[in-house]
Amino acid sequence: MATESATDAWTCPVRPAISVPSCTAGPIKCPSVDGAITFIGGVIEPFAGEIIDVKAPIVDEETGKQVIIGRMAQMTEAHALKTLEAAKAAWDGGQGVWPQMSAQARIDAMEKFVAAVKERRSEIIDVLMWEICKNTADAAKEFDRTMDFVAASIAALKKEVKEGFLGEWTAVSGFVAKMRRGPVGVNLMLAPFNYPLNEMYAMLIPALLMGNVVVMKLPNIGGLAHVLTAEAFQAALPPGVVNFLTGSGRVTCTPVMKDGAVDMLGFIGGSKAADALIGSHPRAHRLKVFSQLEGKNMGIVLEDADLKVAAAQCRAGSTSYNGQRCTAIKLVMVHEAKAEEFLELLIQEVQGLKAGLPWEDGVSITPLPEPNKPAYLEELIADAVSKGATVVNADTGGGTRSGALFQPAIVYPVTSEMRLFHEEQFGPVIPVAKFASPSEPLAAAKQHWNGQQSAIFTADPTGESAAKLVDGLATIVGRINLNVQCARSPDVFPFSGRRSSAMGTMSVTAALQYFSIETSVVYEEKSEVSAAAARGIDAKSNFLKPIS
């Protein structure tokens, strides 16, 4: 295997930026999405303030500049507070049209919304390919998986109402009760660029189904896909139930939180930003928080592992969508007796990945949408190389930069003195460390800030070494994967985390519960008057109304 010298300051080899002959090259036409709008209180109208161009991380050969694929409004604090006021009006202290609707009426509205969004499927997929450079299959999968999540959430809500605890009048210890779940209130929601549709909707849809109203901060990268849904929201929902925020998060979200009217924060992103928003709320004790944050998920390759399986899964876990996933494997620790053999297999796996434009057949590695990410990855590698590591796949292009495209780099041996051991790279750099005893990766996990997932690779049917790791990791992470990469799916599985990785659990059923509050109607079993009143209320109440 080839290496880079640790004696010189390491820099990425550079090649020409990945480009298209013109904006109309390839099987899809360059999109043009006009996000120079506001969507507040059910009204879509042109934006009169600052507007910026949205650029794809792909260069136009004719101009030598990034392709412009749309525009986006840059809201001010005043716009943000106007958006919040629209949400507050729709909530109306819980007496608004949406929170007072029956669950069935809200389901009908959401199904109307989904039908309208599905009509724009191809446009949304095209925008995902251009703006965040997801390949065709991944962009389509994000859209389709999101629509499946909506359907599963609706089915789960119906089941909860029909079969859940106290779903019907139930006598317990002299009292009779019926329970439904009600909304929390005004929600502020933020989701990241890497799954702009799926991760936002994993919070948004359950929240809406339960009767909440939402101020929805569109990501600065990946926001154009949401712009394409504004008309569907407008047609399906009462005014102010969903409102868009665009522009700087600090400029817009901070004043919204400082107002104190936000009852719940749904946040997927970095812990520093989450802490800042939570800290901005004047009554944090009443703020309910759902968050999915960073992860430095570890792949642990034991001495008894099937190395071909381990190499294939670690490669997939480290490079799927360029490693830009919170669930990506971001540190591999392999037993020292198998390290060299594992590395050779991993290099072969990575070498087989095709890099290029998102819509090209068979492409896995695509340009990175975050402008500063290639330089950051180079910085992490340089730090590791300066402390004794090498880029072991350098002779096949590992670590090469082509504009925004970054060829996957395998860095070995990574140690705890290196930044790559601790920092979440969120990109196609694969740090590989070695260990002599399974106690070493467990000790590393114990000391780490991460609490999302781990993957253990073992073929030992006795479970001797792996069982100890499972027991140790069970109080550190939320999911332990055996001989398979870390992942969030299937969506019915609980996606949880500890430490700085999460607050709350994401799944079809868990999200419905987290974005709602149990409310019971109760009377004494011996009171015939109360029983008669309950029957009358049951027949007329939207809150207690059954779902068809």
Image (cartoon, rainbow, N blue to C red):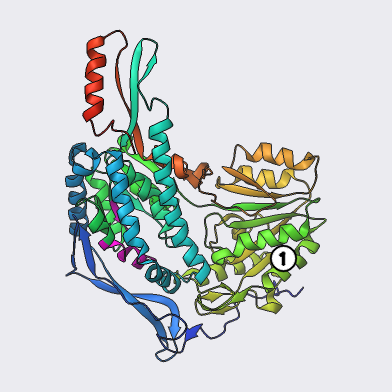
Give the side of residue 498 with respect to residue 47, left or right: right
Residue behind mark 1:
346
- Which residue is pictured at 55% across the width and 61% down the height? 425
Residue 433 spot, x, y in % from top left: 70, 57
> Can residue 212 be spotted in the picture?
no
Q: Residue furthest right?
A: 337
| Magenta span of residues | 215-231
85 horizontally vs 299: left or right = left
Which residue occupies the extreme front position in the image? 548
Q: Quadrant of the C terminus?
A: top left
Camera-nearest residue between 241 and 384:
241
Q: Hey, which residue is sitting farthest top in the picture? A: 526
Residue at (68%, 73%) from the top-left corner? 352
Q: With 334 as the anchor, is 376 left or right in this view?
A: left
Magenta-colored stretch includes residue 224: yes
| Residue plotted at (25% across, 72% down) | 51
Q: Is residue 33 magenta?
A: no
Q: Which amino acid does label 1 sit on?
A: Leu
Kind of element beneath mark 1: helix
- Image spot of residue 441 (x, y percent): 69, 47
> Is 266 in front, or is 207?
207
In this rendering, the answer to whether 112 lies above or below 322 is: above
Q: In the image, residue 284 lies at what x, y percent? A: 32, 38
Task: Answer with left or right where residue 285 lies relative to residue 24.
Answer: left
